Amino acid sequence: MSSINLDIDRRHIWHPYTSITQPGPVFPVRSAKGVYLTLDDGRQLIDGMSSWWCMLHGYNHPVLNQAIVDQTHNMAHVMFGGLTHEPAINLAETLIRITPAPLQHVFFVDSGSVSVEVAIKMALQFWQAQGKPQKNRLLSLHKGYHGDTFAAMSVCDPTTGMHHLFADNVTQQIFSESPRCKYSDPWDEDYLSDIQQKIAQHKDQLAAVILEPIVQATGGMNFYSPEYLRRVRELCDANDLLLITDEIATNFGRTGELFGCHHAGISPDIMCLGKALTGGYMTLAATLCTERVGEVVCSGEAGVLMHGPTFMANPLACAVANASIDLLLNSPWQARIQKIEKQLRQQLEECRDWPQVNDVRVLGAIGVIELKQPVDMKTIQPRFVEQGVWIRPFGKLVYVMPPFIIEPEQLQQLINGMKTVVASL
Ligand SMILES: *Cc1c(COP(=O)(O)O)cnc(C)c1O
């Protein structure tokens, strides 16, 4: 039987955004394979979260397992200051090849939040180097989410982004409204007026605009029009601002295109990658920038980009990222995601008319039911488990982002579990 001591977990371990004195329920996982999590008591759950959107190819994939084992036999880690290695070189080459062409330089970091910190640092150093240190603010969007470290927090939605909690320590940034034009909405110039106005008013103090392309994920699962993104790119060019796109949630196919930017055919000056980069195996993220940003940053007083994490470009993480990207690009990923999208649309549509439901939306391999009331996590979570699915809502949003390898019957089961629980609310 189980040797897991949940009492130690409950008494001593912080889980994400939880109380140490009143912890919520946690379910011990013994193992995972494909789309299934196996709990310690033997129950199997279909994972609708891809472990926070990372596990593209499912769990325990033989190719990814092998990549880690092989790399372990060469070296698990080596410092990146003054040394380099093939997994990092191969990964940089791939990322430069598959992201928009102007992106030419890669900075490897250990988490998404840190990649956003580095992106912001690049933008600040870019203007410092040109004798404009007063251009040191970011313009961000309501409903944005960019991570939990301090600079990243400063560009998260000002209401849900913990700003009042850390008021004295979070840099005051400029915010524009969340994009109002839904993904397929016809374009109206009025959609641009708020950000136009904010840029006109603050451009002398702005270093960059930062946003999540096409999908504002954690801040509200808002899918917005590619035209908005194209127009913001134009505004940045016209007003001498850098554009930072945070692709951490959208990267590697989740929205139906390889990157969110591809929906709009634009290229940012700085791009953040993370989450699915290693297919969910290891923590790794990257900040990419254009040749111009790289050159200007390094022409400044410091002469270098002032960052260097201990575990930068960890070889195990780079090796598994290389294997994961190969696996993705050599799979019929677009057809798979279109199939998932179609099934999500068909099977979620009926929920639109339910009294407790505010909206249903689907894009790529993301299916969202927005409720009228926020869920009570402590009571709803066990109900999903009873249905044999792993779904972890936030606020009013009950959503799934399954691994791309999910079979139609498995997806059907996942959606049924989601609907059964929503129907019972
Ligand atoms: C998850 C996420 C982050 C933060 O990444 P971590 O690896 O959790 O630090 C940043 N930006 C976006 C868009 C994200 O979805």
Image (tube, rainbow, N blue to C red):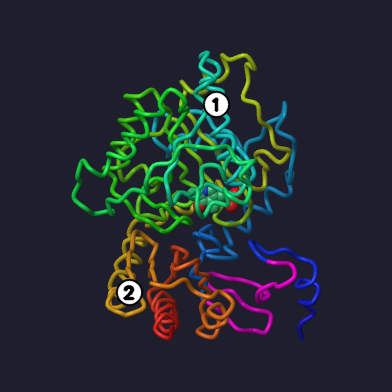
Label 2 is placed on what type of residue? Answer: Leu
In the rendered image of this protein, does residue 335 appear above or below residue 356? Answer: above
Q: Position of residue 377 (x, y in %)?
A: 55, 74
Residue 338 image offset from top left, x and y in percent: 31, 61
Within 10 Å of the Cα at label 2, are there few (<14), some (14-19), or many (20+) other Cα atoms? Answer: some
| Residue 32 on the magenta segment | yes
Task: Give the total of numbered labels.
Answer: 2
For the point 68% across and 42% down, the residue is: 314
Which residue is identified by label 1? 124
Vertical relation: 64 (above or below) 32 = above
Q: Could you tell me if the residues under marks 2 and 1 are in contact, i.e. CB atoms within 8 Å? A: no
Residue that mark 2 sits on: 348
Quadrant of the rendering where the N terminus is positioned: bottom right
From the viewer's perspective, tell me whether residue 402 is left or right of residue 195.
Answer: right
Q: Which residue is painted at 70% across and 37% down in the image?
A: 309
Residue type, numbered disc 1? Leu
Q: Residue 55: percent from the left, percent from the top?
A: 53, 60
> As rendered, which of 79 and 332 lies closer to the eye?
79
| Of residues 201 and 405, the one drawn nearer to the viewer in this rendering | 201
Residue 113 is inside the magenta segment = no
* Residue 417: assigned label: none
Q: Which residues are magenta?
A: 19-45
Q: Is residue 161 visible?
A: yes
Graded by Cα atoms within 10 Å as few (under 14), some (14 to 19) or many (20 or more), the crowding at tag 1 reads many
Quadrant where the image shows the C terminus: bottom left
Residue 168: image location, x then y, percent: 64, 41
Above or below residue 417? Residue 211 is above
